[in-house]
Image: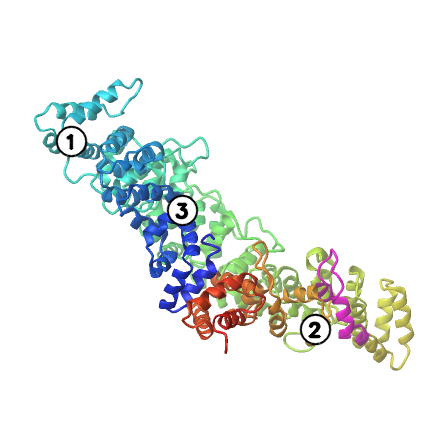
Amino acid sequence: MNHRSATPLRLALRLAAPDTADALAARQRPELLAALSDRFGLPEEMVETLTGPDGAALRAALDADPEAFLLRAAETGDPVIARAVWRARYRIAADRTRRARDLPELLPAILRAADTTDPRWEAEDGLLPLLQEEATRIELLPALTGPFPQLISFTLVQVARFLPMPVALDACIALVQLVGDEVLSAIVDGVERIEDFDLGRPELLDLMREAAADDDPESFLRERRPAGEWTDPAALRALMMLRESSHPGPRPDALDWELVRREHARLPFETEPSQGYSRHHGNRLLPLTRWEDCPDDLVMECFRASPWTTARVAAELPFEALVGPEAAAGKVPFDDALGRGLRTGRLPVDRLLAEVTPALEVLGALPYDHEPTRKALAGLLDRLGTDPVNWLTCYARMGRARGSVAELIDDAASTASRQKRNTSWPRPLEAVFPATPPEASRAAFLHLFQCTSEEAQIAVVPHFDARAVQHLLVYGDPAPAVREAVIAAHGVAAQAAQAATPSLSPERLAYLLDLDEPQVDANLFFHCRIDQQERVRMLAGRLRGGGTRPVPDELLHVLRETNLGHYRHWLIAGLDSGDLGVARTLIGRLKLRIPAARLRLLVAVWQRGGPDAVREILALDRLPVTLRRQTEKLLDLPDGLDRLRARLAAEEDPEKLLEFLNKAPGHDGSQPHKLTGEGIPLPWPDLITAYRSGRLAPGAAQDLAERTDCPRELLLALLPNTPEVDRYSTAWPQLALRNGTLTPEDILTHAAPARRALSHLRHALNSAEQKPDRQQLHTQAATLTAAHLGTDPEAWAVALQLLPTFAGTLPELCATAAAITRPTA
C-alpha cells in the first residue's frame, strides 16, 4: 500500500471519532506503516521507531507535513535515521516541486542533534561519507560550523573560493576548537601537496599559516573576523546560490547590500549573457535584481550586460536605464518595465512622459488603468483641446516621432511648425470582419484618446476612419455620450463593425441585439458567441422589439458562408423557421439524414408560406424522391398540412427515437448527438421511463448522461452504475457535478460501486468549483458513517476490507460492515 492507495483509510481516520480513529489506526498498523513508508521515503521499521506503537501517533503521521516529519526524525540524533532522512529529502523535495532539491533546515537539524562519539557517523555506510560523496556545495554550508572536523575541513576546501572571509574564519575557529592548533597547518600542508589544486583563496592560506604560528590561534582568528558580517545562514545560502546560478528565492531579511557589493568586487558575479539555454549559466546578477531593494548600481551593471532580460525581470528599473543608450537602441522592453515602475512609484510619471523616447513605444507600454498615469496624460492632452486638427496631426506624427510623449503632444498642438497639419484621418482604412485589435500607432492613439475629456472625444470622433471607429467601440470603453456621437456621425456601419467580435460584454451584446438591424444581426450571428436560441430567433425573422419580418439577405448570406465542419448547428437553428430563404439555404447546403428533420423543415415552410412555398423547396431536388412524391400528393388536399404533421409526429414518436438511440454509434458521433444535430428534441421523460424499464441500452444512457441538458432524474437513475474516474477525459458524473445537475451528496448516497463513488467524491472535492462544499460533505459523511459504524473499529476495518469489491453504494457498504460485525440475534 502506498500513500495514495491509502486514501480510503486516511478518509476513514478523518471521519471517525478521535478515539475510534486511534483504535482503527492501531488495528490497521501494517497498512499505515506501508503507506507512511512510501510517503516519507523511509523504511517501515524506521517509521515504526519514529511514530511508536500509539494509534494516535500513526494517525497524526498520515497527515503530517513531510518536511516537518523529517526534521523531527533528524532531531533524534540517531546516525542511521539521519542517513535515511538525508536520502529521503529528494522525494519530499520532488513532491513539493521545489526548484532546489534540498531541504535547507535538514542538515543543521541533524548536526545539532549529533553525538560525535558515535562511530556510525563516520562508518563506511554512515552519513559523513555520503555527504562528502553527493552533497552539493550549497547543502554543505551548515557543516562549516558543525561538530565534525572531518566534514568542516572537507567543506572548507570545497567552497573556500566562494566564501566571504568571515565565514571561512568561522570554519577555521570551529576546527581549532574541535581539534586543536595543529589542524590549520595540516590543512595548509594538505592543500599544497595536492597537485594542480587551487583553493582559490591564497589570502586564506596565508592567514591560516599565520594563525598556526601564533601562540593563540583562536584569538588570532577572532581578532581578524569582522563582527556582525555574514552571520545569517540564510544570507550566506543566498550568496552561494547566486554563485551556483540558482535562484535564491525571497530576499533574506539580514542581507547587507554593502557586503554583497564587496563580494562582487572580490569575485565578480558573472554578467556575460548565456550562449545556451541552461539556467546554470549567464548573468548571475539577474536574481539579485528581482529583489525590490536591489541597489541601482547593481541593477545598472546587470542591465548594461543584459538590458532586455534585466528590464523584464528586475523588480525596480532605475530611470537611468530608460533614457540611456540601451533604450535608444531598442533594447529595453518598455511593456514590462514601465508598468512595474509606475505602479510602485519608482518611476516618476511626469519625467517619464517628458524624457523617455520614442513616444510610440512609451504610449504602447503605459498602464492606462493606473490613475496617476491617466491624470498626467490628461494634463498633457489639454494642450490638444477639442480641435480635431490637433488630434489628427498627433496621430499622423505618432509613428515617426523620435521624441517623448510630451514633445509629441506639444508638436501636434503647435501651429508654428512647417510640417503638414492634418485635417482628415491619414491613410484611412475600412473596418475588418472579424474585428482585430489595434496595433502600433492605432493602439497607442486609442489609449491616449480615452484619457482626454468627453468633450474632446465627442468633437474628434466624427473624423475617425471606419477602422478607428471599430477599435473604439470594440476595444475601447467609450462613455454613453461618446458612443452616441460615434453613431450619429458614422451610422449603422459603426454598430455593424462593433458586432463583428466574440468579445462583447453582456450589456453591449444586448444593446446590439435590440437594434434589430439586419447587418448588425448578421455580424452577431457570424462573429459573436450568441446563444443558439438567438440564432433560432433571427432565422425565424422574429424581432426583439416585437413582430416578424422576412429573414434579410444579410443573414442568408451568412448562412451560405458558414463553415459546416464547425458550425453546422448554426444552420440547424433555422430548421423550424419556415422562412423560404432560410429553407432554400438549408436544403441547398445540408444533407438532412433523419426523416424527422426533413419533415420538420417542410411543415415549417408550409405553415409560414403555404403549399406554393413547399413546391419551391421540392423543386430544388435536394430531398429523397419518395419524400418528394408523398409530399406533392398532399399539397392540394384540404387536410394536407395536418397529414404532413401526422407523419412528422410518427417519425418523432418516442419509441421510434428510442430505437434510433439504441443503435450502436458510428464513426460520426453518438446517437443522441445525431438527433440533436438534426434539430430533433430528445423526449427526456420517455427516455427516463425507458431506462428504468430496461429498454434504453446502457451505452445510449451513458451518451445521454454526458449531455449538459441531461435531466437530474436520469442522472440519479444512472448513478448505481457509476463509471471509473478517467484521468484522460471527464466522466459524466464530473460533468454533472461541474454543471450543478448533481451534488457531492448525490454521489455520496446514490453512486455505486462504492469504490468508484469514493473516487468521484475525492476528484470533485479537490477541484476548485467544489471547495465550498468540502466541509458540508465531510459533515454528511461523518454523520453517515457514525450512524452505521459508530465507535467500533472492527466495523470500520471491515468496511475498508469490503470497499475494493463492494457493488453497492457507500451507505450500503457502511450498513453491511455494521451487520457483519454486529449481527442481530
What is the tally of numbered marks visible in this picture? 3
Q: Residue at x 59, y 51 (%)?
A: 429
Confirm whether residue 317 shows in the render.
no
CA–CA distance between discs 1 and 3? 37 Å
Name the N-terminal-most of marks 3 and 2: 3
- Residue tagged by mark 3? 41
Secondary element at tag 2: helix
Residue type highlighted by circle 2: Leu
CA–CA distance between discs 1 and 2? 87 Å
- Mark 3 residue crowding within 10 angstroms, few (<14) / some (14–19) / many (20+): many
Main SS class of the magenta portion in the image: helix
Name the N-terminal-most of marks 1 and 2: 1
Which disc number belongs to residue 176? Answer: 1
Say which quarter of the image contains residue 756: bottom right
Q: Which of marks 1 and 3 is in front?
A: 3
Confirm whether residue 430 shows in the render.
yes
- Residue tagged by mark 2? 687
Task: In the displayed orientation, state which residue is furthest to the front.
Answer: 825
Q: In this view, does 775 lie above or below 173?
A: below
**Does the magenta-highlighted stretch encompass residue 667?**
yes
Q: Position of residue 147 (x, y in %)?
A: 21, 37
What span is in magenta? 648-676
Kindly indicate whether the residue at mark 2 contacts the one at mark 3 (C-beta within 8 angstroms). Answer: no
Q: Residue at x 33, y 42 (%)?
A: 248
Q: Of residues 28 and 235, which is closer to you in this image?
A: 28
**Residue 6 placement, left or right of 642:** left
CA–CA distance between discs 3 and 2? 53 Å
Say which quarter of the image contains residue 606: bottom right
Residue type highlighted by circle 1: Val
**Does the magenta-highlighted stretch encompass residue 230?**
no
